[in-house]
Image (tube, grey):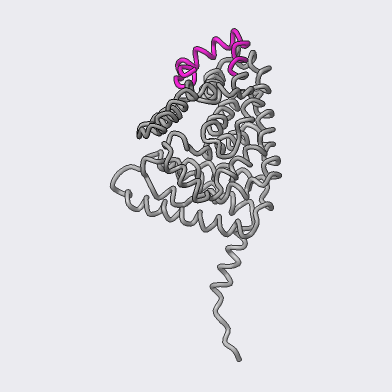
Amino acid sequence: LFEWSQRSISAKAMAEFAARYPQHLQMLIDIVAKEKKEDALPPGFQDNAKKAADFLELGSEAAMQQMMDSLLVQSPMELAIGSVGNLCAAGASLNLFQEQISGLVPAMVSALRRHLRPNDWRDCGPAAGALCNLLRLPSAAAEVESCSELLLKALSEETKPEIAAMKELKAQLPSRLVVSATSRLLGVLVNLVVCRPTSLAQLQHHGALEIVLPLLDPEAYSSQGSDDEPQVISTRVCLLSGRLIGAFPDALKLDQEMQLLQKLQKILQTISEFISKVAGKTSIDEKILELFDPPVRLLVTLLTKTGALTRLARRSEENSEPSRSLS
């Protein structure tokens, strides 16, 4: 399972195998769907936990470290979820795979949706990633659309402010165990509306704009550090919001419009400052231009599809009128 879930070369070979013998994919689906205790825990975790408890009674300082080391090992459940996702990604270009696996798509979606639980640090992100890869199969979009409400609920809970006790717990755990699922949940939603535009109505019905718009962070575009997670999140927010506003311009409230314009203005200022720094010195990296493309497209959609441009022009005219003196 580790080999299948981690290496793209192995996944491609397994996709070809699954295309010839699709019944073997059912074994992975069963692991994901049945949620047995022995599959949900890392191998040997219970024995290690018992040993750690014994060490604690003896006052050993290595007990907690042993527990952390055990938790860092991926469980069969995590590996099975990763394997399903990799198989779908590698097999999307194989016609035989698409034909043979189409009958298993409902079972795969049903199994993966069980793991879209908010703040499930181990399984929620991988399950969302697997659904994202599953959308590469032509027959999967309608099934994934049925997960719209769950995806938005998980996204909403993931981004809520954390209580102090939760922050303290996260600080004590290895970063490998507390990976946020936000970017991958957004990735599923973006791919879904691209593959199945009719899903926009379902997302709007469940309040997608109210959940997604607050996640746009102008500061993500001002940093060029090694951590690109905030940039990925903000980019996907722009892509999804642009589609939603383009399809349902009247759904955007005035206070949301104002906040969005303010955020986009900050992003445009960042773009201007960046270009002025590199102008005449070196060629601009295409990756940087691609990073700024989604917020610019969102601004164009906002100005052309809603009444934002008219309201801005009216406000500008009001501000430019000379003040009348009292007679």
Residue 26 counted in the magenta span = yes
The answer to whether residue 237 of the structure is visible from this angle is yes
Which residue of the protein is positioned furthest toward the left in this rendering?
281
Q: Position of residue 211 (x, y in %)?
A: 61, 47
Q: Which residues are magenta?
A: 1-28
Magenta segment main secondary structure: helix
Please tell me whether residue 51 is drawn above or below residue 262 in the rendered image. above
Q: Residue at x 64, y 13 (%)?
A: 100
Q: Position of residue 60 (x, y in %)?
A: 36, 32
Please tell me whether residue 95 is drawn above or below residue 254 in the rendered image. above
Figure label count: 0
Q: Nearer the viewer, residue 273 or 181?
A: 181
Q: Position of residue 125 (x, y in %)?
A: 53, 33
The answer to whether residue 89 of the structure is visible from this angle is no
Q: Nearer the viewer, residue 15 or 244?
A: 15
Q: Position of residue 229 (x, y in %)?
A: 45, 41
Occupied quadrant, residue 172: top left
Q: Residue at x 48, y 40 (%)?
A: 232
Q: Quadrant of the C terminus?
A: bottom right
Which residue of the protein is positioned furthest toward the top in this rendering?
20
Residue 296 counted in the magenta span = no
Q: Residue at x 46, y 42 (%)?
A: 170
Which residue of the protein is positioned furthest toward the bottom in this rendering?
327
Occupied quadrant, residue 22: top right
Q: Nearer the viewer, residue 83 or 64?
A: 64
